[in-house]
Image (tube, rainbow, N blue to C red):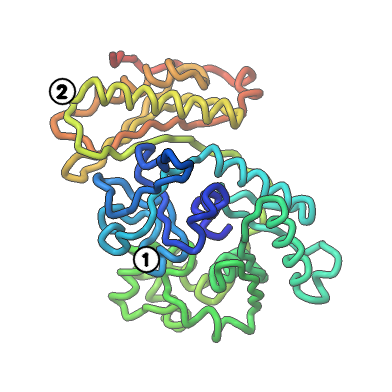
Amino acid sequence: MDAFYASVELLRYPALRAQPVVIGGGRRYQPEALPDGSLRFARLAEYAGRGVSTTATYEARAQGVNSGMPLARAARLCPQAFLLPADFDEYRKYSRLFKAAVREIAPTVEDRGIDEIYIDLSDLPGVAADGGRAVATTIKQRVREATGLSCSIGIAPNKLLAKMASELDKPDGLTLIDAGDLATRIWPLPASRINGIGPKAAARLAGMGVRTIGELAAFDPALLVERFGRATGAWLHEAAQGRDARAVVTRSEPKSMSRETTFERDLHPVRDRDALSAVFTDLCERVAEDLRRKGYVGRTIGIKLRFDDFATVTRDHTIEGYTDDARTIRRAAGACLKRVPLERRLRLLGVRVGALVPAADAARLPARRPEALSLFD
């Protein structure tokens, strides 16, 4: 989906179309209703805090604003942009709508999150004749009819190339790539455009003189194995050659669910104890709600803390039975919290539930003896 969260917001606020819009910043940046019935929208220049951009319209991206960018930096790049808070309930609704529209045409779908899917077109009628262009065009039309939103589709022999193809002609793109297009469409791209090459790996490759996918494809595979290890080195070579044997997986079970928040200001474990406790409880309740909505239970509960010096600490605790209960999650997460020296201010707090199983299956699984619990509040 194209700039998904921002595009959903533009359905609600059409006056902001063709404007730079950034999603993030918290609920206090909700549009303000004025006496004349119009709405006043916050500007990014008004933002104060340490939140990050969830996404941005293409007009804001043209000014250098990207997803995950600190909003304070985004405000320096594009102060005139409008700022809206995220509404994940609304985004989940539109996510269900666009995926249902796709499955009416192509039922073999791998869900990759709220705004992205892989589709296997191999067995659909007519695909062999035109490479899937007609089917993809129909999918784009159905998605727009169901949601009012545009999407970009990449068609390729495998998932690796399809992912890259889907990003080449955004927004509202339809791009076909085959092995013969590697040299002209894929190899000139930065190596970081391969899904799985993050900033650290890209920096290491750049230090070796490898900046494009083509340069990676031409690099000695033995040296890649020597410098990145057997598995990663071999994968880098295969990916640069456009090879990927992964199948479209129509069902996979989540391993964990989590919620976290970055504070607008650093919170002190003692002086801000009440505020931290309220946030802690809210995170546990939201994770429990996620579990119940998706039909899962878990028994490994964990926390994530980031301090004012950016040091990050995680702790896990396994309980006896599976749960989706907020109080049980909070109690176990509190036990984890007791195991961390709370001597510095906190920037971020998160709660995670892992070792998930479908709730319907939990009663048939053996219980595990719990670790000793220590209560928090």
* 284 left or right, relative to 51: right
Instruction: Determine which quarter of the picture holds residue 27.
Output: top left
- Where residue 279 sits, quadrant-wise, is top left
Percent from the top left, x then y, of residue 14? 54, 54
Identity, as a three-letter code, of the amino acid under mark 2: Val
x 50%, y 75%: residue? 240
- Say the numbered circle drawn on residue 270: 2
> What distance separates the C-alpha of mark 2 from that of mark 1?
44 Å
Indicate the secondary structure of the residue bearing disc 1: helix
Provide residue 48's location: percent of width, then percent of height. Answer: 24, 46
Residue 228's disc number:
1
At 80% from the left and 69% from the top, the residue drawn is: 127
Asked if 111 appears above or below 341 in the picture, the reply is: below
- Quarter of the picture containing the N terminus is bottom right
Q: x, y percentage for residue 242?
A: 57, 74
Q: Going by the image, does 85 lie left or right of 186?
A: left
